[in-house]
Image (tube, rainbow, N blue to C red):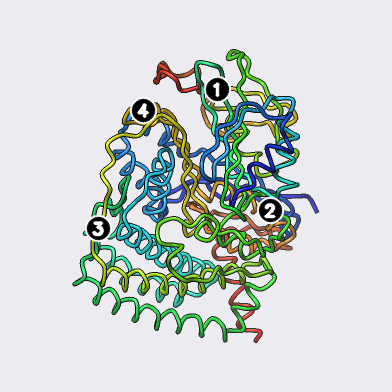
């Protein structure tokens, strides 16, 4: 069984809107709370970071971390939305979760997010490319957003 | 002595993927490593957003030639997770059977490559020879040796007919005998032990810190296996043991993979027994996927494959995120390679079982008389094994 209710009661003041499904908990978190939420999940509850998903939505640039609680087979997914699309910025969780280093570097290049406090903020994918690559790649495409409610 | 740099990668003409490692060495000892990826950006996540859910199955099947069950299975789990779709019992057994056969052939492939890297070419040829019947099993079941096109949202596309069960059992019996022979030979070989024990150690804490998965984490004492943690398909209906060892070295990673082959054979037999006596539908027709989010994962041979989809009620994902196990396992090399001799770097890297194409590159050496000569890492690794063999 998952420990969602226990987590929600402990972190009640740090999390926002919640979507609960069997073994899945998606919830909003503010940038100033993300480090504390990550620390609680990774260090106190022993969760493992599977990865993070970044996306441009109509509401802003969104980062969704996926923490797996392996002993219960459940996922805790804090969601951070940066409304300023021209300069998206948030706190890095790499100081707490070493396994977040690569995915945060990738999100920097792909979506132009600045992760404050990242220990190695250099490009991961394009760092040694023979040609000069314009990053973030989000600005190199003319693709339009699809979907009526993908935020 | 000044620190020198040895580039490993980025391209190799024989293998399919590209990664770039920079070993920083002090004399014969590796002191640090820089890792670079991004040499082959294929845009799978972006392409998937323009495909229907069924089309995306064929797309993600082609992310990896070895894990061509794991990615589609994790993807259909993610889509099914959006609406909590149930799948028929028979389909659960077929999915599990295919997944475990993939684990057997992948671990045998790795075993062969590991043997080749340390100068055990007989092991390489044995392992690849005995992998061949597994690929033939795939051909019997799906018509293809690779890229089986069998997973669907709501079930599977192809059944395992009862008349196929007996020949498949025969192949499993034969493979088990051969793997037993390899395992016994490896167990009794003092050179192999000297070559692999205590080499490239990844501690339990490091595995947790790097969020490592699969045999890389299990060999370091971390209990993590998606098949046990979140059992989908028939994994809660079959009996098997999660293989976990404590030392975190290359020897333990080898042991974990070898023992997992036996567990996979055990699971395959249970699935085949069930498929031979039961019948019924293999797919629940899914007419639409509603708006929402879903997470799917599967324990691939290298560890957890992760897929996330966000849907908007149409027949395509709005966002599709893919994370392969090598993405979290390769960074552990930064911890496991520190302090090891250059000759052990190759097998330490290979022990992670990365999707790589580039572990063999030219290295310039200078002897005491200032004569320079070149030697590749593969040659260096094999030479070390030969030295141990001669000394025993």
Q: Distance between the residues labelled 1 and 2?
A: 31 Å
Are marks 2 and 3 in one subunit? yes
Q: State the CA–CA distance, disc 3 to disc 1.
A: 40 Å
- Quarter of the image for residue B168 reads bottom left
Marks 1 and 2: which is nearer the front?
A: 2
SS for tag 3? Answer: loop
In the displayed structure image, the side of residue B293 where residue A83 appears, left or right: right
| Pointers 4 and 3 within a single chain | yes
Disc 2 to disc 4: CB gap under 8 Å = no
> Which is nearer the eye, A23 or B352?
A23
From the image, tell me which residue sits under label 1: A136
Viewport quadrant of the C terminus of chain B: bottom right
Q: Nearer the viewer, mark 2 or mark 3?
A: 2
Task: Using the image, name the chain to which the residue with label 1 belongs.
Answer: A
**At x 74% / y 40%, what residue is drawn?**
A39
Q: Residue B144 carries which label?
A: 3
Answer with mark 4 or mark 3, whichever residue precedes in sequence. Answer: 3
* Residues at discs 1 and 2 in contact (Cβ within 8 Å): no
- Badge 2 sits on which subunit? B
Q: Can residue A80 be seen in this view?
A: yes
> Residue B123: where, in percent of width, then height?
46, 76
Q: In this view, does B351 lie to the left or right of A115?
A: left
The residue where tag 2 is placed is B208
> Percent from the top left, x then y, of residue B135?
31, 65
Question: Looking at the image, is B306 positioned above or below residue A28?
Answer: below
Q: Are marks 1 and 4 on the same chain?
A: no
Looking at the picture, tell me which residue is in the foreground, B126 or B263.
B263
Check contact, mark 4 vs mark 3: CB within 8 A. no
């Amino acid at each position: 069984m998952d420990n969602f209710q226990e987590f929600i009661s402990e972190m009640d003041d740090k999390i926002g809107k919640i979507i609960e499904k069997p073994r899945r908990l998606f919830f909003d978190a503010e940038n100033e709370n993300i480090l504390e939420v990550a620390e609680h999940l990774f260090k106190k509850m022993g969760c493992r970071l599977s990865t993070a998903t970044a996306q441009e939505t109509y509401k802003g640039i969104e980062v969704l971390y996926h923490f797996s609680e392996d002993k219960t087979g459940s996922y805790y997914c804090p969601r951070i939305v940066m409304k300023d699309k021209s300069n998206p910025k948030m706190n890095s969780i790499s100081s707490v979760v070493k396994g977040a280093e690569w995915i945060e570097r990738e999100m920097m290049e792909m979506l132009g997010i600045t992760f404050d406090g990242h220990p190695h903020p250099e490009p991961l994918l394009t760092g040694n490319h023979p040609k000069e690559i314009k990053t973030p790649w989000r600005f190199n495409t003319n693709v339009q957003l699809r979907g009526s409610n993908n935020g | 002595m000044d620190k020198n740099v040895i580039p490993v990668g980025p391209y190799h003409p024989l293998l399919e993927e590209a990664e770039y490692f920079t070993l920083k060495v002090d004399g014969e000892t590796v002191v640090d490593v820089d890792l670079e990826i991004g040499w082959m950006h294929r845009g799978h996540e972006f392409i998937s957003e323009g495909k229907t859910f069924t089309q995306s199955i064929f797309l993600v099947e082609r992310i990896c030639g070895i894990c061509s069950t794991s990615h589609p299975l994790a993807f259909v789990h993610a889509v099914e997770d959006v609406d909590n779709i149930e799948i028929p019992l028979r389909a659960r057994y077929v999915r599990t059977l295919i997944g475990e056969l993939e684990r057997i052939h992948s671990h045998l492939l790795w075993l062969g490559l590991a043997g080749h890297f340390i100068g055990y070419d007989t092991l390489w040829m044995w392992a690849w020879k005995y992998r061949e019947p597994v690929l033939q099993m795939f051909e019997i079941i799906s018509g293809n040796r690779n890229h089986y096109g069998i997973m669907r949202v709501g079930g599977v596309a192809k059944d395992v007919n009862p008349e196929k069960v007996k020949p498949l059992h025969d192949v499993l019996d034969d493979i088990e005998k051969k793997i037993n022979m390899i395992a016994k030979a490896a167990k009794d070989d003092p050179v192999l032990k000297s070559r692999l024990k205590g080499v490239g150690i990844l501690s339990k804490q490091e595995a947790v810190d790097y969020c490592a998965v699969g045999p890389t984490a299990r060999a370091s004492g971390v209990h993590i296996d998606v098949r046990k943690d979140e059992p989908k398909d028939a994994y809660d209906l079959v009996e098997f043991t999660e293989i976990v060892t404590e030392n975190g070295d290359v020897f333990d990673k080898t042991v974990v993979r070898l023992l997992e082959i036996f567990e996979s054979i055990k699971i395959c037999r249970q699935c085949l027994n069930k498929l031979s006596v039961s019948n019924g539908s293999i797919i629940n027709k899914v007419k639409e996927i509603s708006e929402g989010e879903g997470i799917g994962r599967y324990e691939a041979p290298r560890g957890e494959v992760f897929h996330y989809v966000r849907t908007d009620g149409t027949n395509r994902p709005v966002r599709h995120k893919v994370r392969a196990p090598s993405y979290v396992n390769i960074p552990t090399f930064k911890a496991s390679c520190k302090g090891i001799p250059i000759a052990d770097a190759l097998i330490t890297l290979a022990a992670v079982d990365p999707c790589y194409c580039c572990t063999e590159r030219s290295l310039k050496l200078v002897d005491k008389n200032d004569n320079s000569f070149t030697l590749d890492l593969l040659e260096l690794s094999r030479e070390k094994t030969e030295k141990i063999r001669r000394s025993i």
